[in-house]
Amino acid sequence: MGEPRIKAGIWVSAALRLGEVEGKPGVVVRKGDADAGDVLVILHGRTGNMVLTQFREMNGEIAWMRGTGPQPVSEEATDAYVKKQVSYDPDLWVIEFDAADYLPPFEAKVI
């Protein structure tokens, strides 16, 4: 049996609180399934946005991938990426943070 998973709604609430503590305010852009939805994180920086997408590594640990690539992208590219991901997964959460350094306010392994 696998490791118990935190419900998505609880994880999102905790991430938003951590953002406030870190000086990186965040908001829910799209509410997904409260129990089992995956999460996209938009980081608004100085020169554009980065979108982090959640996945599980081979060992089952959560990691994050720069879904929009290694460089910041425009608001239009961000919106297009999010729209495409939501079309694949209607239970998806989308949250965003003001993060000038493009680092999430929560502990994350970014690949």
Image (cartoon, helix red, strand yellow):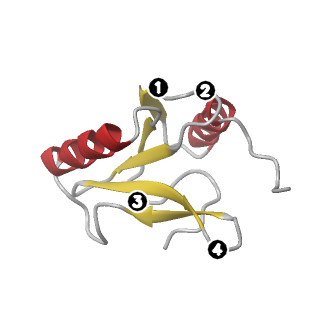
Q: Amino acid at mark 2?
A: Ala
- Rendering coords of residue 8 (x, y %): 62, 36
In the rendered view, does 83 fall on the left or right side of 44?
Answer: left
62 and 89: which is toward the camera:
89
Of callouts 3 and 2, which one flags the residue occurring earlier in the amino acid sequence? 2
The amino acid type found where label 3 is placed reads Tyr
Q: CA distance from mark 3 to mark 4?
A: 26 Å
Relative horizontal placement of residue 7, taking residue 85 as reference (left or right): right
Question: Residue visible at 82% across and 55% down?
Answer: 3
CB of mark 3 within 8 Å of CB of mark 2?
Answer: no
> As drawn, which residue projects farthest toward the front?
1
Give neighbour class at mark 4: few <14, some 14-19, many 20+ (Cα, 10 Å): few
Nearer-N-terminus badge (4/2): 2
Instruction: Tell me the quadrant of the picture where the N terminus can be found.
Output: bottom right
Residue at the spot 45% in from the left edge and 30% down from the top edge: 27
Q: Are marks 4 and 2 in contact (CB under 8 Å)?
A: no
Residue 44 to residue 62: above or below: above
Across and down, in percent, residue 30 comes to: 40, 28
Q: Are the residues tagged 1 and 2 within 8 Å (C-beta)?
A: yes
* Residue matched to label 3: 102
What amino acid type is highlighted by mark number 1? Lys
Residue under numbered circle 2:
34
Instruction: Return the residue at label 1.
Output: 31
* Residue depth check, mark 3 versus mark 4: number of the one nearer the observer: 4
Q: Separation of disc 3 and disc 1 at Cα?
A: 22 Å
